[in-house]
Image: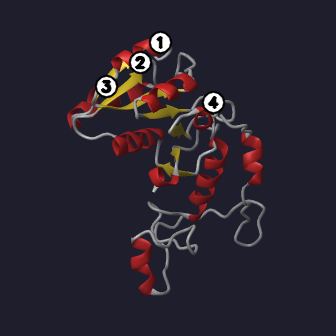
Amino acid sequence: MRDFNPEQELWKIRREFGEHGGVSPSISRSSTFTVMDPAIMPDIFKGLRGPEKGGYFLYSRHFNPTVEILNRELAAMEGTEAAICTASGMAAISCALLQICGKGDHIVSSDIIYGGTHALLEYLLPEMGIHTTFVDISDIGAVEEAITPDTKIIYTESIGNPTLKVSDIPSLAAVSKSKRLKLVVDNTFSPMIISPAVLGADVVIHSLTKYINGASDVLAGVICAEKSFIH
């Protein structure tokens, strides 16, 4: 476990100014971006060029200048290599889980989680052949007993929504690594307070609608992880 201070990491990253020198970054609302040289487009589609590789943008579902700044800030805050924002917290959770799991796979999850996540795990993912066992996440023995040969993920919230049950992330990380599983942690309730990736989590998720936004006027989510996972 490394020394980590989210405030210091946010201070270290590159600052962005507005298009005309504004102290706040410009907001880019465009869905599509111009590529002046058509010969470059195949490289963009192949991932050989992009925001970090030449400053190229093409379509906002992939890359957007404003969202890229937010991605970079959130990755710094969580101490991960990269981050990608999504349209909602549930989109972040769904995308992360479906990247790891396919038909026939299994998830061990905390039994105290956000209602939308519980519905996804209990009702929707089984339609895709992905099943979940819900356990008292504070009982590490119960977590280990629930793991099967098909298990791919241990899923929890750093602080449970809405019961505020706190997960022992280092212990869960030790179990996940010993079993070659992915530990996915929803850190919505505790940005800047708990750093799951530093404690051993593989993937960190937020509903940006909650504490990170704080004003009830934004619907968004984020996945923070290694670059290979994000890409």
Find the distance from the CA under tag 3 to the CA under tag 4: 25 Å
Q: Are marks 2 and 3 in contact (CB under 8 Å)?
A: no
Residue at 53% x, 15% y is 163
> Percent from the top left, x then y, of residue 57?
51, 71
Find the distance from the CA under tag 2 to the CA under tag 4: 23 Å
**Residue, disc 1:** 139
Q: Are marks 3 and 1 in contact (CB under 8 Å)?
A: no
> Percent from the top left, x then y, of residue 138?
50, 14
Which of the labelled discs sits on residue 190, or is there none?
Answer: 4
Tell me the element at label 4. loop
Residue at 36% x, 15% y is 145
- Identify which amino acid the numbered label 2 is placed on: Val
Q: Are marks 1 and 2 in contact (CB under 8 Å)?
A: yes
Find the distance from the CA under tag 1 to the CA under tag 2: 6 Å
Camera-side residue: 118 or 77? 77
Mark 4, other Cα within 10 Å: few <14 / some 14–19 / many ≥20: some
> From the viewer's perspective, is the residue at label 2 or at label 4 nearer?
2
Whichever of labels 4 and 1 marks the residue nearer the N terminus, that label is 1
**Residue, disc 3:** 132
> Percent from the top left, x then y, of residue 150?
27, 31
> Percent from the top left, x then y, of residue 212?
63, 39
Name the quadrant containing residue 218. top right
Relative placement, left or right, of 189 versus 223 is: right
Whichever of labels 2 and 4 marks the residue nearer the N terminus, that label is 2
